[in-house]
Amino acid sequence: MPRPAVVFASGQLLTHECWSPQLPALSVDWDLRFSDHTRDETIAGMAGRLLAEAPEQFHLVAHAMGGFTAFEVMRQAPERVLSLALIATLAPNDGPAQTERRQGYIRLVEAGQFAEVVEERIPILVHPARREDERLLSVVRRMAAETGPETFLRQQRAIMGRADSRPSLGAIGVRTLLVRGAQDGITTPAHVEEIVAGVPGARFDEIADCGHLPTLEKPQTMNRLLAGWLAG
């Protein structure tokens, strides 16, 4: 009997390695797939590529920018998604301040300062107590290096041009789990409350002592949450 499929959608500057702690825990019972978020300059393009490469039906687990892709998947082909897990993500599109910050990143990368952009972002990605954790930071830096400046620019432009997903939250009709690290430096409790209030029946789990990367920072907790969620 074939195993049910799970598609992982990763965040910006992250690779499949951000899910590496989950693979041993989930691969026995689930057919694990990874969406390609490196080649498109729009979130709609990322979602279309995910759908083209995914099996007919699948569970969708998405982190950060991958959550933007997941919202678009739910608009394009909601009937193909069996359940949805959203980690460290948010529904609104960028306001002027966020757009200006991203344009600043683009200018720096185009000036050859990609490494400096990565280092500037690290403090907001991990729990404050982990900012000297060289094992964790080496994984973050390795994923960023593998992403590279050109892909980063595509991802940045895709994020800047994304749709506001708040108006479509009420149409999400599958089981939906929200997960956020309590010390996430990018998403806020208000972002989570907005999604939980908008998606019918959505459940929320907060992970204590955790930043924006719970799959790496709190892998055992994430494994437990995802295994229970996928099992229904």
Image: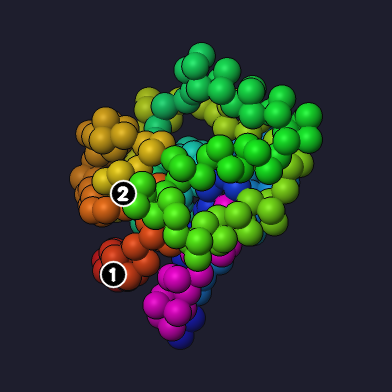
Q: Is residue 108 left or right of residue 75?
A: right
**What's the CA distance linking mark 1 and mark 2?**
15 Å
* Residue 2, x across and y down, in percent: 48, 81
> Is residue 79 located in the magenta-colored stretch of the structure?
no
- Residue with the mark numbered 1: 224
Q: Nearer the viewer, residue 21 or 125?
A: 125
- Up the image or down, 189 lies above or below 101; here it is below
Whether residue 25 is situated above or below residue 57 in the rendered picture: below
Q: Quadrant of the C terminus?
A: bottom left
User: Total marks drawn?
Assistant: 2
**Vertical arrangement, residue 58 with respect to residue 94, above or below:** below
Residue drawn 39% across the image and 77% down it: 25
Give the vertical position of 123 relative to 193 (above or below).
below
Return the residue at label 2.
181
178 to the left or right of 109: left
- Please indicate, yes or no, whether residue 64 appears anywhere in the rendered image: no
Extent of the magenta region: 14-29
Magenta segment includes 21? yes
Q: Nearer the viewer, mark 1 or mark 2?
A: 2
Q: Amino acid at mark 2?
A: Gly
Say which of 20 and 184 sits in front: 184
What kind of element bears circle 2? strand
Residue at the spot 45% in from the left edge and 55% down from the top edge: 132
The overriding secondary structure of the stretch rendered in magenta is helix
**Which labelled disc corresponds to residue 15?**
none
**Quadrant assignment, res 159:** top right
Crowding near the residue tagged with mark 1, few <14, some 14–19, many ≥20 C-alpha atoms within 10 Å? few
| Tag 1: amino acid | Arg
- Circle 1 — which element? helix
In the displayed structure image, the side of residue 165 where residue 51 appears, left or right: right
**Which residue, as the protein is rendered here, is positioned at the far top?**
96
Point 37% across, 67% down: residue: 219
